[in-house]
Image (cartoon, coloured by chain):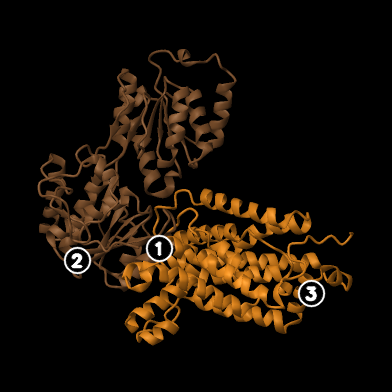
Chain colours: A orange, B brown
Amino acid sequence: MTPELIIAIIVTVVGASTPILIAATGELVVEKAGVLNLGVEGMMLVGAIAAFITLFLTGNHYLAIALAAAAGVATSLIFGFLTLSLSANQTATGLALTIFGTGFSALAGQGYSARPVTLLGPLFPAEIATHPVWRVLFGYSALVYFSLAMVIAVWWFLKKTRAGLILRAVGENDLSAHSIGYSVVGVRYAAVAFGGAMAGIAGACFPLLLTPQWAERMTAGRGWIAVALVVFASWKPFRLLAGAYLFGLVMTMELYAKAGGGPLSVIPSELWAALPYLVTIAVLVLISIRRDASSNAPACLGRPFLPSN
Amino acid sequence: MTINRRTILKAGAAAAALPLLGSRAFAQGEPLKVGFMLIGTPNDNGWNFGHAQGAKFMKDTLGELVAEPTIVENVPEGPDCERVLRELAQSGHKLIFATSFGYGDYVIKVAQQFPDVKFEHATGYQRSDNVATYNARFHEGRAVCGTIAGHLSKTGKAGYIGSFPIPEVVMGINSFVLAARKINPAFEITPVYISTWNDPAKEADAARAMIDQGIDIIAQHTDGPAALQVAEERGIVGGFGQGADMSAFAPKAQLTSIIDHWGPTYVQSAQAVIDGNWASADRWPGLKEGEVQIGPYNESIPADVVAAAEAVKNGQIDGSFNIFTGPINDHTGAEKVPAGVTLTDAELLSMDWYVEGVNPPA
């Protein structure tokens, strides 16, 4: 492998990992607040179509990202209303949200599939990224730096701030948090909305970062990988970062190995396709062997908050 | 009229509630009702779009002889499609096109219950008295693309993004390489199967992976323009549109495109039902019949290359040229088809080997 090829692979891996990382960072905060939202895939699709239509109509990439976030929030609030205000089952509601998002995005995207747009260009001027090494560091669009910044911000928020402590308290013991005067439902609404915004932006990565078009179901299951990734990372932001890049690496290396021959190309496609999930299972087994195992899952995860009980 | 599954189910329920309205109720001279069952929506700019365009072409050509075609979208390849087929038949459709491979078993089953309704199954292989099958010789278009690739590629290396290694895809790859190697005997191609028909981000990454490793021509047998967009962005020699003209996505990179044109075959079938001489058959038309068409050539292609591509196209139209005429070696170099022998349709439809010049995938 030449250095140029390695750099090219890194650039592709970063692109493939970014939407998963953004969506998973949002879902991590949602789950830390004790809510399991399985609607990530659906919110991503709504974000993707919102971003695409905005971009197609205005040509403004940053407005597209903003409206994708807003669309993600709006979709997540449907989930929030049903599960938080009406105490509906979170698993079923989340699955329904994915089905809704898939159908709604297809409906909203009618007539947009044959329309080309342009990718969001690199954040830094091209002069900085001429040398290959600098390209690895400074050659990406703003979405990539956003994803990394959000990992740090979420870690800092959860670990170092009072608000983060309250959010974790709500996720670990909702009744206690309620009894000392915190609004459990309010905190959870905020977390769900944040998760929606992040899923919307993750969806925006598809037309803006990966392939400048709209296609129905274009997220192709990456929302589910994001949900799995949160468990994989045992709810820790920096493990999430490592996991997202590991998944991105596996997904990308499959294609480079097949295209380039070499020792890795003997692995059959089916095994490559299964690898991210096999890695998830392997990591889950490794984590559960350890003592602190499942204790890291928020104690109230997926439980509706019913203070009267 | 484009209606969704729910509407057709209601229509079917209404028809079922009036069992006396049998086929006799449709008097002579009433327009023929034709139904189409699609696996996706016509918005895909590819496969389903092509069939919807074909339905429109049929209506435009036959005018008052046919009713506005009924198109049922998003019908999965499973038991649900049986219900859709039955309800189309019960609501007076006398000719029904099922346009995805996986509908086959259900078409045969429902057709037994409606002997006076004619069914046609795209890309299928099972027939009965009232079930016909039809397909298109897409590989003829691939030979035209391969000819262009052989002339224009500087590295002599092409990438080919495939969905699954099924005969239809393998046939296209082989046709492409055979044509390219007639121009450049050192031409080689690496197929990458991505195990999906619709994951544009994965297609784009596959294209990046191939371009980063030295290919300068890209072809794909998936449903979207993602690979062409990467080709445009990276400025390689180019690629080819599949199913429809994709030049809007890649004005520089799309060298030409293979366009599905199902219209004529739909007109022919509907006319046969109206005339009362429809018969079950297996139709596999191609360039000659106009079912497969070659889109406009990119302006950047030199005139002599366009002429060579046109020669291959016209040779296939007048029957003087067949890409699958030997000598053909397989990828190990062993002779597979002797000189002067042409592969039969049955051999093509079960093709599971690669010709010389293909680096076979694992």
Which numbered marker is on residue A268? 1
Q: Is residue A92 visible?
A: yes
- As shown in the figure, which amino acid type bears the numbered disc 1? Pro
Q: Is residue A59 visible?
A: no
Residue, disc 2: B153
Chain letter for mark 1: A
Residue A19 image point, x, y percent: 52, 68
* Mark 3 to mark 2 CA distance (whole Å): 62 Å
Q: Earlier in the sequence, mark 1 or mark 3?
A: 3
Which numbered marker is on residue A169? 3
Is there a contact, CB below 8 Å, between mark 3 and mark 2? no
Which is more foreground, mark 1 or mark 3?
1
Query: In screen coordinates, is A142 left or right of A282?
Result: left
* SS under mark 2: loop
- As shown in the figure, which amino acid type bears the numbered disc 2? Ser
Image vertical order of residue B4 relative to residue A121, above or below = above
- As shown in the figure, which amino acid type bears the numbered disc 3? Ala
Badge 2, how many Cα within 10 Å: few under 14, some, many 20+?
many
The residue lying at 44 percent from left, 32 percent from top is B107
